[in-house]
Image: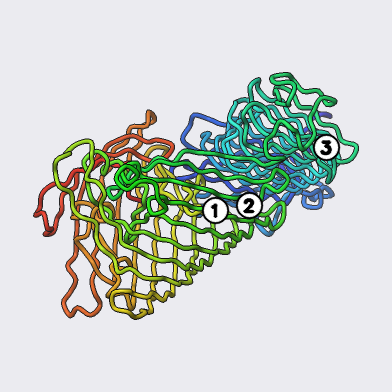
Amino acid sequence: MKYVWPLLFFTLIWTKLGQTTDQTVSYDHVYALEIDLPVAGHITIETTAENQIQIQTSPVYPKSQTDEGESNPPTVEVDSPPLVINRLEDIVQLSLPVEGQPARLDLQIQTPPDLSIRINATDGDIRLRGIRGNLDLYSRRGDIELRQTTGRYKVALDEGRISGQILLNGGQNKFVTKLGSVSIEVLDYLAAETKIEAPNGNIALDLPDGFEAVFEVWKGEQLTQSFVSGEGERLILLRTGEGGKVKLSGVSFSTNATRNSRPRSEDLPSAFDPWRPGLGLKFNPAPVIDFNRVHGLVLGGQTTLYQERIPQRQYLLSLSLSPIRLINQGLSSQSLDYQAGIKQTWQQGEQSASSLTAGLTVYRLTDIISSVGQTVFQEPLGASIWGTANLDYYHRIGGQVWLKQQVYSALAIDLTLTDEQQNNLFKYTDWSLLAKNRLKRGNQRIRAGNLQSAKLSLSLDSRPEKLTRSRLFRDLQMPSPEPTVGWLGKLSVELARQSVIEIEESLRVSEFHLQLTRYNRFGKNHAFNIRGHAGMLTGADYLPQRLFYLGGFSLRGFAPREFIGDRLLLFNLEYVYLHPTGILGAIFSDSGCAWYQADQVLPRFGLSLGLGAGFSTPEGQLRFEVTMPQTGSSNGRQPHFVLRLGQAF
């Protein structure tokens, strides 16, 4: 009996000091996990095959709450676990209540692998294994360990060591420990922009043989070593303090004398290696291959370039021409399209996603008339095969200056000033792979003249994986090719003055335009997406290039320009199933109308239903769609077939 009471007392105290609880959260519709831990504790996250997130907590309460002085210490009955779980749409948030916080709380979490994670911890180790998603991790003190994780990384420590075996997945990555060392092994050949900083420690980076990238080694604020591995373009920056050491293994480098040799610290070339052309200029050339039904095939090339010491300042040069116009008209400035530009970005804080970008472009280019839910990237496939005429084109010659403030990763504000001449374009060919002898619809005329405008836009993109395409040296938000979650939208206000040569006067035009898309993912392979468009124009009655047009890609099942006006409403619904092999199926419905405010009759409303099938590619979806109008159309209620690259929204 003499051991019974001490054992009972220890059991009661342990029950009161530490209690393990388990909770589960359904993984359906979840794409992100956010953890705020204001007390000490370790966080361990591992993957599981179960379709749920399992959370195990081990709290330790302060001794002042245990009432050890009582002769019969009571047990602590916890009505709810010491963890608050909130579900904010597609995000699961873990936090502690304001009152009754434990002195320490360890978390052990099991989850399916596809999950973006944000952790804000105070004192304790963070261990992640097998996660595939963006990782935003911060701890004031402790070690961070990553094992076989894949994604984009933002890892920061005030005091502690960062280690891991990781796979990169594009984007910009950052690993920073203010007081500690970094040791990372990259498991695959995919390179991405990466910055590793240990101002009071050492850096060890192990890469697979054949890994291609641009490497820079900094000691404090001084660039001490720089070299290129293979044909790499992505920058890997390693920065230590004045007394820090950098160990880099598994790569080969290029100099004027030696290639494909493993570098030693004494062999690393200087920042201005004579092997590099242009005394430190970095070129990123790419071909231009396009097709539009006005010019036919368009060929050319473009490049962006920057100084390696100033990568945040970039330049653009692009030239393209139509071989058919070249044969028919000869080489002249009228047959040549070009773009040239410069932009500078200022990052606002090393730990911040906020940035400011200023840019200037001059151009002579072919653009589409109207852009209601349409982009120039959607036309080439159908136009080159069947000669379809969903879009019309005009010529723009002039320039733009812009200022863009990236408020945070999902929100941006930009101001664009434009001064350009707008001219008509005529068809130079009716060529297409099929239906070669069929006469195609002519290109719509515009009212030529000069445009000066100021446009203010607010852009929203909260998707975890953002897809953009470059145009006029700027990033355009593109639809997600795979099921995702988040918002994609743009609100713009434009004030313009446009001279019209034909009527010899200037018109003042204002445009208000709202586009908002909601992406909803169910499980891993199902998506239900919704898009809404609304627009209003004033003073644009005599300017065909300014009006709203619906049909074709935007209101599927109807003729390309069946609805025209200075007012716009458009709604799109779509369910998509994407098989793990990349094959997809879709059910969709489009509805909307465009009308003139001056009309005294109710606008005609278009409604269509459709089915689609195809497969997903990194650049978008290749889809075959059949659409049936549910209201009267110019073609009657006949099914409409289309093959195109890129989904509607």
Helix, strand or loop at label 3? It is strand
- Mark 1–mark 2 distance (CA, rounded to whole Å): 8 Å
Mark closer to the observer (3, 2): 3
Considering depth in this image, is 22 or 340 the residue closer to the camera? 340
Residue found 31% across the figure and 56% down from its top: 393
Position of residue 644 measured from the top left corner of the image (x, y, whole percent): 29, 42
Considering depth in this image, is 124 or 215 the residue closer to the camera? 215
Amino acid type of the residue tagged 3 in the rendering:
Thr
- Residue 446 versus residue 331 in the image, above or below: below
- Mark 1–mark 3 distance (CA, rounded to whole Å): 48 Å
Residue 129 placement, left or right of 362: right
Q: Which mark is residue 224?
A: 3
Evaluate if marks 1 and 2 touch, with contact meaning CB atoms under 8 Å apart. yes
Dot 1 or dot 2: first in sequence order is 1
Q: Residues within 10 Å of mark 1 (few under 14, many from 20)?
A: few
Residue found 74% across the figure and 49% down from its top: 39
Amino acid type of the residue tagged 1 in the rendering:
Asn
Position of residue 373 measured from the top left corner of the image (x, y, whole percent): 34, 56
Q: Which residue is denoted by mark 2 in the rendering?
A: 95
Residue 388 placement, left or right of 471: left
Residue 568 placement, left or right of 264: left
Q: Which residue is denoted by mark 1 in the rendering?
A: 86
